[in-house]
Each structure stands twice: as structure tokens, then as C-alpha cells.
Image (tube, grey):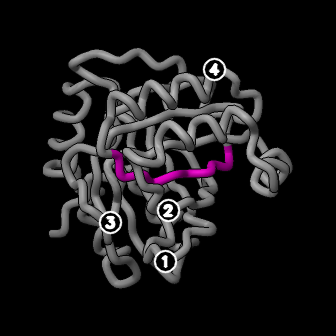
Amino acid sequence: MKKILLLLSLFFSPLFFAEDGPFTVFYGFQTENPLDIVAATDQLWKDCDKGDVVVSLNADAINGESSNTHTYVVNFPDNAAFVKWNNLFATCPGVQKYFETVNPIIEFTQEIMGLPLRGFGDTAQSEYFQVFSIAVQNPMKFVKAYDELMESNTECDSWGLLAFGAGYTRQSGTHLAYCGFNDLTSYLEQAQVREPTEEFQKFIRKTFKISQLNAVSMVEVVKRY
């Protein structure tokens, strides 16, 4: 049976970082039957106890060349939660039922662990996200410049920066940054800004030699569990 480390919401509020978590796992997939996936996921969490993790089913609404149509985002508060999750997929009969339903209509394309470095705001309230995939050559300098940029943030209702761990590929980049919005109107207002702010121009000047922006995507939360 195909096993899934369900993938995001990327999102913890408030964020508290320790050696024992939190961390996030992203599971990207493509499907032509999104409503059937929602129904199968609903049934999965009726049949199985997912414990303390927060799971989001996200639609990759505008994502360029990516083959993903959706992503499961799973937030683990600590290592013990991941161990329980791992055991769940080996013991709960509902998992077998889930895969029997979705295997004909789904193809998993990506599994990546994300380690939160920075975070702000209540991501559980954000329904739309601008997501940036970045390849960073000097993480310390990049994070410092990111901190300075986000000190002046007034646009995002929530925001954060993660470093990729297990599952990293060159295509995925090394880091993921996100800016969350609580409604579509707020998202569209920022997505259509033509002139970069002075703070963003400073950020680009400090980071263009040590990083490369691989992709910018629009992500919509379909359902949280």
C-alpha cells in the first residue's frame, strides 16, 4: 500500500521553535477529481484519530510549471506527534480504505519536510497565501535580511519562513516563504501591487547575490482538519 506523509496549514500561531518541533510536512499531488479527494479525506479523519496534528488540504490555484494541483500540509507540534502519526498509517484500517478510494484518481508528486525559522500571525485565519520557493546560498545573511523586511510588514495577515529538510530537491529550492491573507480581496490587492516598496527593494539588494527565486504560487485553503 502506498504510504503518505500528508503535506502547506504550514501554520502555527503563536510559533515556538525548539529542537523537538514544531515542523511541517508537505505532500503534493495532482488529481482531476478534487471533490472526491475532499470526500475521501473527510472519511479518513472520521475513521482514524490523527492526534494533535493540524492537517490542511490546499489547492495550488496558480502555480506556474508545477504539476501539483493540491497539497496536504501537516503541522506536527513535536516529534512524539510524528511518531504517533507514523504508527497511525500502519494500524488504522481507515488508511487502507482511503488509498483504495484515491489511488485511481491521485498521483503523489512531492514530499518535503519544512522546518519553521520565522512566523507571525494566526495562519489558521488565513485562507489565501502567496508562496515563494527560494534557493538560498547563505542562509544566515538571507534570514537577517528577511527579518529586516518583515519588521515593516503591514500587508500580510500572517507570514513565515521555513527551511526544507528531508525531501529537498533542487527544483523545490532550499527555503519557503509565505504571506497569508484572511480573504481573497486582501490577497488580490497585494498580488497586483505594481511598484515594490522601499523595504522590498532593500531586501532584493541584500539577497540577490545569495539567493534565487524559483517560483511564486497562489495557494488556497480548501479545508482544515
The mark that comes first in sequence, 1 or 3, is: 1
Please give the residue where the numbered disc 3 appears in the rendered image: 171
Q: Which mark is residue 151?
A: 4
Circle on res. 220: none
| Above or below, comparing residue 165 to residue 110 in the picture | above
On the image, the x and y values in percent for residue 55 come to 44, 44
Question: How far separated are the C-alphas under marks 2 and 4?
Answer: 23 Å
Say which amino acid is labelled 3: Gln
Stretch of the chain drawn in magenta: 127-136
Q: Are marks 2 and 1 in contact (CB under 8 Å)?
A: yes
Q: Earlier in the sequence, mark 2 or mark 4?
A: 4
**Depth-wise, is mark 4 or mark 1 nearer the camera?**
4
Q: What is the C-alpha distance between the residues marked 4 and 1?
A: 32 Å
Q: Quadrant of the N terminus?
A: bottom left
Contact check, label 4 and label 1, Cβ < 8 Å? no
- Give the image location of residue 152, x and y in percent: 70, 23
Q: Residue at x 45, y 71 (%)?
A: 68
Residue 65 marker: 1
- Residue 215 is marked as 2
Task: Look at the image and say whether residue 193 sits in the magenta stretch.
Answer: no
State the SS at label 3: loop
Tell me the element at label 4: loop
Check disc 4 and give the amino acid type: Glu
